[in-house]
Image (cartoon, rainbow, N blue to C red):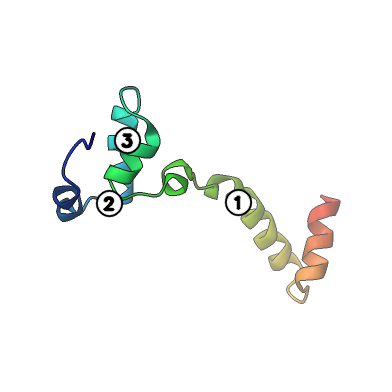
Amino acid sequence: MSLVSQKSIQSAGLSLERKRKVIDMLKEEYPVRLLCEVLDCSPSSYYYRSRREDDLHFREEIEKIAMEFPRYGYRRVTAELRRN
Protein backbone atom coordinates (compact mmCIF):
# COMPACT_ATOMS: atom_id res chain seq x y z
CA MET A 1 0.00 0.00 0.00
CA SER A 2 3.08 2.23 0.06
CA LEU A 3 2.93 5.08 -2.45
CA VAL A 4 6.67 5.37 -2.99
CA SER A 5 9.56 3.61 -1.34
CA GLN A 6 10.45 5.22 1.99
CA LYS A 7 14.13 5.36 1.09
CA SER A 8 13.57 7.46 -2.02
CA ILE A 9 11.43 9.98 -0.10
CA GLN A 10 14.04 10.40 2.63
CA SER A 11 16.82 10.82 0.10
CA ALA A 12 14.82 13.53 -1.66
CA GLY A 13 15.40 15.81 1.34
CA LEU A 14 12.11 17.69 1.12
CA SER A 15 11.57 20.62 3.45
CA LEU A 16 8.56 20.59 5.77
CA GLU A 17 6.83 23.22 3.62
CA ARG A 18 7.24 21.09 0.49
CA LYS A 19 5.99 18.02 2.35
CA ARG A 20 2.88 19.99 3.36
CA LYS A 21 2.29 20.96 -0.27
CA VAL A 22 2.61 17.34 -1.42
CA ILE A 23 0.19 16.20 1.30
CA ASP A 24 -2.26 18.96 0.33
CA MET A 25 -2.18 17.81 -3.30
CA LEU A 26 -2.73 14.13 -2.44
CA LYS A 27 -5.04 14.28 0.60
CA GLU A 28 -8.18 13.86 -1.52
CA GLU A 29 -6.95 10.47 -2.75
CA TYR A 30 -5.09 9.14 0.32
CA PRO A 31 -5.46 9.47 4.09
CA VAL A 32 -3.37 12.25 5.63
CA ARG A 33 -1.86 9.85 8.17
CA LEU A 34 -0.59 7.57 5.42
CA LEU A 35 0.88 10.48 3.50
CA CYS A 36 2.57 11.79 6.63
CA GLU A 37 4.05 8.37 7.32
CA VAL A 38 5.35 8.00 3.77
CA LEU A 39 6.83 11.51 3.76
CA ASP A 40 8.32 11.06 7.24
CA CYS A 41 6.33 13.99 8.61
CA SER A 42 4.38 13.83 11.84
CA PRO A 43 0.68 14.68 11.48
CA SER A 44 1.04 17.41 14.10
CA SER A 45 3.74 19.06 11.98
CA TYR A 46 1.47 18.91 8.96
CA TYR A 47 -1.50 20.49 10.76
CA TYR A 48 0.54 23.12 12.64
CA ARG A 49 0.06 26.68 11.44
CA SER A 50 2.06 29.54 12.88
CA ARG A 51 0.20 32.37 14.59
CA ARG A 52 2.87 35.01 14.08
CA GLU A 53 0.43 37.47 12.53
CA ASP A 54 -1.67 37.36 15.70
CA ASP A 55 1.41 38.01 17.84
CA LEU A 56 2.50 40.94 15.68
CA HIS A 57 -0.26 43.18 17.06
CA PHE A 58 0.72 42.39 20.67
CA ARG A 59 4.39 42.85 19.92
CA GLU A 60 3.73 46.33 18.51
CA GLU A 61 1.63 47.27 21.54
CA ILE A 62 4.31 46.01 23.93
CA GLU A 63 7.00 47.99 22.14
CA LYS A 64 4.85 51.13 22.23
CA ILE A 65 4.33 50.76 25.99
CA ALA A 66 8.03 50.01 26.55
CA MET A 67 9.03 53.15 24.64
CA GLU A 68 6.59 55.28 26.60
CA PHE A 69 7.47 53.74 29.98
CA PRO A 70 11.05 52.37 29.71
CA ARG A 71 11.26 51.38 33.39
CA TYR A 72 8.17 49.16 33.33
CA GLY A 73 8.73 45.48 33.93
CA TYR A 74 6.65 42.68 32.48
CA ARG A 75 3.96 42.97 35.17
CA ARG A 76 3.31 46.65 34.54
CA VAL A 77 3.45 46.16 30.78
CA THR A 78 0.88 43.36 31.12
CA ALA A 79 -1.35 45.59 33.24
CA GLU A 80 -1.02 48.39 30.68
CA LEU A 81 -1.95 45.99 27.86
CA ARG A 82 -5.08 44.96 29.74
CA ARG A 83 -6.08 48.60 30.21
CA ASN A 84 -5.91 49.29 26.48
Q: Work out whether mark 2 precedes mark 1 in sequence or the reverse, and give the earlier one.
A: 2
Secondary structure beneath label 2: loop
- Residue at image coords 20%, 35%: 3
Q: Work out whether mark 1 precedes mark 3 in sequence or the reverse, and give the earlier one.
A: 3
Seen in the picture, residue 51 relative to 34 is either above or below; the reply is below
Q: Nearer the viewer, residue 31 or 70?
A: 31
Q: Which mark is residue 23?
A: 3
Mark 2–mark 1 Cα distance, whole angstroms, equals: 25 Å
Q: Describe residue 83's horizontal placement relative to residue 22 as left or right.
A: right
Secondary structure beneath label 1: helix
- Residue at image coords 66%, 53%: 58
Secondary structure beneath label 3: helix
Q: Which mark is residue 9?
A: none
Q: Nearer the viewer, mark 2 or mark 3?
A: 3
Q: Work out whether mark 2 precedes mark 3 in sequence or the reverse, and give the earlier one.
A: 2
Amino acid type, label 2: Ser
Mark 1–mark 3 Cα distance, whole angstroms, equals: 27 Å
Q: Nearer the viewer, residue 75 or 4?
A: 4
Q: Nearer the viewer, residue 33 or 18?
A: 33
Q: Which mark is residue 15?
A: 2
Residue farthest to the front, as pictured: 1
| The image quarter in which residue 61 lies | bottom right
Circles 2 and 1: CB atoms closer than 8 Å: no
Amino acid type, label 1: Asp
Task: Report the residue marked by disc 1.
Answer: 55
| Mark 2 nearby-residue class (10 Å; few <14, some 14–19, many ≥20) | few
| The image quarter in which residue 5 lies | top left
- Residue at image coords 70%, 67%: 66
Q: Nearer the viewer, mark 2 or mark 1?
A: 2
Amino acid type, label 3: Ile
